[in-house]
């Protein structure tokens, strides 16, 4: 059964989530005496900081995609090398057998560029097998074990490159899932801290109450901060 996809609980960038956590931690350290009245002491602040550090240190999607792209480039190079080796053999085969004959068709090496990875690997193994079966007939056009070995080696290199790329695709999926899970855990802990902070300062200190307000989106947060800076600037002028 396929695992159900995990959805992010916050709709702003991960970097902003981490920044919000660090900002609220500073406020909570400032208000530690009040937080302790809710059995939320230094141990829980340390725990939240630890989760935030783990979240910060996880590779982001740009890193994972970059690793995947590097292996894709190596796979494409290995594919080109394998196709070149097969074409070199088929050029010799065409000298011996007309490309409209069954003997030529038996190699199944037409349209190499249109083959999937799996089809190309299958084709490489087939042309080596078929060529080896009639190598005595192909000797006079230069087909020998060195030519076939080149194809076999290129096929193995390509297959390894395909497997490595697929592993890296899976690593990216796992990395994204891990980041979402830890981000959700971090967000849940942040909400708990902020709810306590708001309760502490509700109807007591508006500015400190707003220190613990979370916004629904990154844009809402930016608007609120601009408004706050504008208000502080106006007070400074007065």
Image: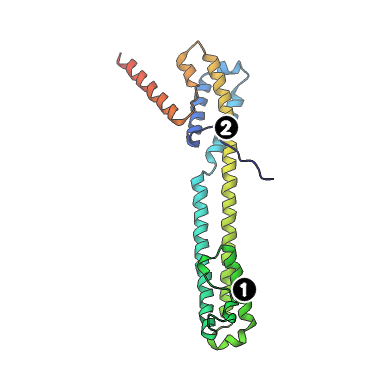
In the rendered structure, the answer to whether residue 91 lies left or right of residue 129 reads left
User: Which numbered disc flags the more N-terminal residue, 2 or 1?
Assistant: 1
In the rendered structure, the answer to whether residue 201 lies left or right of residue 174 reads left
- Looking at the rendered structure, the secondary structure element under dot 1 is helix
Pick whichever, 110 or 17, lies toward us.
110
Identify the residue at the far left of this view. Answer: 237
How far across and down, in percent of the image, does residue 18 sit?
51, 33
- State the CA–CA distance, disc 2 to disc 1: 54 Å
Q: Nearer the viewer, mark 2 or mark 1?
A: 1
The residue at 57%/60% (across/down) is 162
The residue at 59%/66% (across/down) is 119
How far across and down, in percent of the image, does residue 43 sit?
61, 26
Colour scheme in use: rainbow
The residue at 52%/82% (across/down) is 94
Crowd tier of the residue under label 2, counting other residues whose Cα lies within 10 Å: few below 14, some 14–19, many 20 or above: many
- The residue beneath circle 1 is 126
- Looking at the rendered structure, the secondary structure element under dot 2 is helix
- The residue beneath circle 2 is 186
How far across and down, in percent of the image, does residue 127 sit?
59, 75
Identify the residue at the far bottom of this view. Answer: 140
Pick whichever, 108 or 137, lies toward us.
108
Instruction: Check the picture and name the quadrant holding the N terminus.
Output: top right
Q: Is residue 50 visible?
A: no
How far across and down, in percent of the image, does residue 70 sit?
50, 56
Q: Which mark is residue 26?
A: none
């Amino acid at each position: 059964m396929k695992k159900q996809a995990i959805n992010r609980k916050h709709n702003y960038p991960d970097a902003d989530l981490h920044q919000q956590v660090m900002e609220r931690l500073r406020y909570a350290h400032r208000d530690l005496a009040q937080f302790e009245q809710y059995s939320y002491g230094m141990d829980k602040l340390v725990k939240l900081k630890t989760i935030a550090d783990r979240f910060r240190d996880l590779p982001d999607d740009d890193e994972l995609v970059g690793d995947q792209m590097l292996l894709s480039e190596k796979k494409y190079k290995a594919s080109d090398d394998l196709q070149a080796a097969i074409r070199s053999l088929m050029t010799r085969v065409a000298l011996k057998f007309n490309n409209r004959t069954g003997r030529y068709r038996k190699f199944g090496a037409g349209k190499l560029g249109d083959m999937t990875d799996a089809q190309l690997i299958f084709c490489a193994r087939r042309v080596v097998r078929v060529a080896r079966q009639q190598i005595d007939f192909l000797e006079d056009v230069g087909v020998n074990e060195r030519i076939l070995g080149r194809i076999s080696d290129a096929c193995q290199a390509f297959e390894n490159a395909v497997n490595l790329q697929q592993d890296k695709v899976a690593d990216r999926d796992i990395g994204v899932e891990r980041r979402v899970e830890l981000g959700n855990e971090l967000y849940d802990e942040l909400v708990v801290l902020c709810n306590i902070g708001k309760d502490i300062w509700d109807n007591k200190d508006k500015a400190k109450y707003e220190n613990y307000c979370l916004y629904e989106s990154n844009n809402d947060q930016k608007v609120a901060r601009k408004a706050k800076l504008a208000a502080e600037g106006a007070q400074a002028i007065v």
